[in-house]
Image: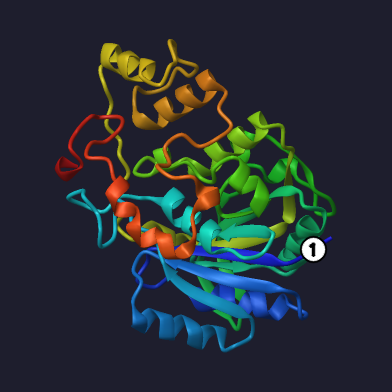
Amino acid sequence: MNEAVSIVYATHRPDPAFEWFADGLANQLSGEDVELIVVDGLFCADRTARFAEAVAGRFAFRHVPAKPTPFNGPHRLTGVEYFAASNARNTGIVHATKPYVVFVDDSSVPMPGWWSEVLEAARHQYLVGGAYQKHREMRVERGVLVSSRSDPSGIDSRWDQGDDHRVVPLAGGHLFGASLGIPREVLLEVGGFDELCDSVAGEDYQLGIRLENAGFRLFYSRAMLTIGSEEHHARGPGLKRLDATLPEPLYLRRLGQFGVDQRATDGRLDASHMVLDVLYGLKQRRSIGNPFDLRRLEPEQLPTLTDRFPERHWFTGQALSEL
């Protein structure tokens, strides 16, 4: 089996503590075929130089801008910057050249054994969600977590379902984006991450449910563990999430425009719940909010996607310039 891996490290932070991951990865490599793609919402030449210095030629590395999105970055149509993780991760899929793709959060360090678990998943081409924890007061030296303070609120909610020595089945709705691996062909088959979730979030478990709908089995690896900084996460990059609600008649009308006549959830009448109502109502497999065919996209085409931007938000109907 081909164990070659593309790692997609997406960031929109002024200081993503990139050296933590770069050093931690380098510590675990033994000559494997791997490339690290940093998809950067704050892309500039100075950051390229800084990230390249952290890599120090120890593995293949590329620094690329997140493809244009109406929600943040230099092409945004909105008045403020919104969270758009699907956009960034889809950028990474387009740039990835290896058959297995792993996504990791910024401001995190891979714990010993993380890379071995990635290689095992790549070798057998199975879909895996890695464990994560959030710690405070992290001190990381040369990619090794020297000290930190664990916070119970930052423990992976799936932890007790796992096993230190083997992967266990994972429900699609429990696929989280902190660390996950999927064959690139599978990602292309389902259309990648759904940009319907941009400005809303939830793109990771939405993908997991679609993969499950498509007949794929998912697994959870507690040994594929990354630890992220709670302080970095709390400070964040200042990206907003859309939290508006609609009156129930308007919500149901909007839902009907997707071809769904009733709710599958009973939560708030907001965009994140409509994403799920549409997902369950259509039993969808492929992304529906992407104005492109991911399989046909090449890196040089990404800057041209601005002409496909919507003028209004799919949920509120507001002009994006008003958001």
Q: Is residue 154 above or below residue 148?
A: above
Query: Is residue 147 rendered to the left or right of residue 281?
Result: right
Relative to 192, say whether 216 is above or below.
Answer: above
The residue at which mark 1 appears reads as: 2
- Horizontal and vertical percent position of residue 265: 48, 19
Q: Residue at x 52, y 21 (%)?
A: 282
Q: Is residue 303 left or right of residue 211?
A: left
Who is closer to the viewer here, 216 or 241?
Answer: 216
Q: Is residue 114 visible?
A: yes
Tally of marks? 1
As shown in the figure, which amino acid type bears the numbered disc 1?
Asn
Across and down, in percent, residue 291 comes to: 40, 42
In this rendering, is residue 271 above or below 264? below
Residue sitting nearer the eye, 135 or 82: 82
- In percent of width and height, residue 296 lies at 52, 51
Image quadrant containing the N terminus: bottom right
In the image, what residue occupies the spot 78% across and 80% down?
30
Circle 1 residues within 10 Å: few <14, some 14–19, many ≥20: few
> Is residue 135 visible to the viewer in this orientation of the structure?
no
Q: Please report the residue visible at 73 percent of the width from the left and 61 percent of the height from the top.
A: 118
In the drawing, does residue 7 fall left or right of residue 79? right
Q: Secondary structure at mark 1?
A: loop
Residue at the image position 75 percent from the left and 75 percent from the top:
32
Percent x, y of residue 119: 77, 63
Quadrant including the C terminus: top left
Looking at the picture, tell me which residue is in the foreground, 176 or 89: 89
Q: How is the image coloured?
A: rainbow
